[in-house]
Amino acid sequence: MSGLIKATRATVAIGSLSVNGYMLPDSSYRMSQTQAAETVGKEEFNARDFLASKTFKQLSSEGYTDGKFIEIESEPNQIRGQSRFRALPLEVVVIYWVYQCYRGNKQAFSLLIALATESLERRFDDAFSVVRTEQERNDATTARIKSLESDLANLGEGFAIDADKDREIAYLTSLLKDNGIKPYGLPSSDRGEGDE
């Protein structure tokens, strides 16, 4: 593959999760498309389909094209191979995770609430000159994710956005049927001339 970008890899802790992070020569960061999906309990094809969707094209910044393939810089004692993959900028990963929240993905919801809270706490810590270690931050993020997951499990169907939509559609469909309208049928052509 021509024009392959080389990146260095590091393990990034997100609470109790660990993901591979990549830094490109221009110092920008990337995450693999596969890990972006797996982090919120989805398969890689789900992220790929999202990136091809009209929704993503409307949400993403101008000029974004498909995630570029990158190659990991060789590490000592590493055999070459299996080191090329599609990489996504962090902004795209976040857009994907937010969309997963919108679709009712509880893992994505817990993860983003915990990350947003940590980001806000870092700014408050800076303003009040509070110093915390990365381990303290990760422990707090882990506890926050677990607490949110537990709360969401207790909410049960109250958070099930798709279930709410299905109930509403069923209600509206029955309402139409009760009034003699076939909601999924073709419109009838028996309207008289002049009827409007």
Image (spheres, rainbow, N blue to C red):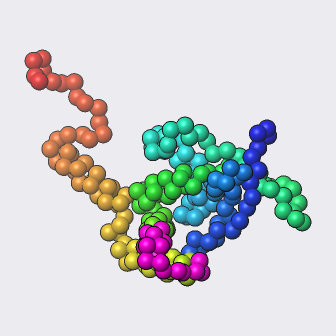
Which residue is rendered at x = 76% and y = 50% of the image?
A: 6
Q: Is residue 85 left or right of residue 185?
A: right
Instruction: Tell me where the magenta segment starts and ends, as one range.
Output: 118-135
Residue 168, x across and y down, in percent: 26, 55
Residue 17's quadrant in the figure?
Answer: bottom right
Q: Which secondary structure dominates the residues rendered in magenta?
A: helix
Residue 159, x across and y down, in percent: 35, 67
Q: Is residue 72 left or right of residue 196?
A: right
Which residue is rendered at x = 35% and y = 74% of the image?
A: 155
Q: Residue furthest top?
A: 193
Residue 13 magenta: no
Question: Where 39 falls versus 24 (above or below)?
Answer: below
Residue 181, x across and y down, in percent: 20, 40
Residue 110 in sight from this viewpoint: no
Residue 49 in sight from this viewpoint: yes
> What is the quadrant of the N terminus in the image?
top right
> What is the quadrant of the C terminus in the image?
top left
Q: Nearer the viewer, residue 10 or 194?
A: 10
Residue 151, x across and y down, in percent: 39, 77
Which residue is rendered at x = 37% and y = 72% of the image?
A: 156
Q: Is residue 41 left or right of residue 12?
A: left
Which residue is rendered at x = 29% and y = 36% of the image?
A: 185
Question: Where 103 falls versus 55 (above or below)?
Answer: below
Q: Nearer the viewer, residue 95 or 189?
A: 95
Question: Where 14 falls versus 61 (above or below)?
Answer: below
**How many circles with numbers are drawn on the protein?**
0
Residue 34's quadrant in the figure?
Answer: bottom right
Q: Is residue 86 left or right of residue 107?
A: right
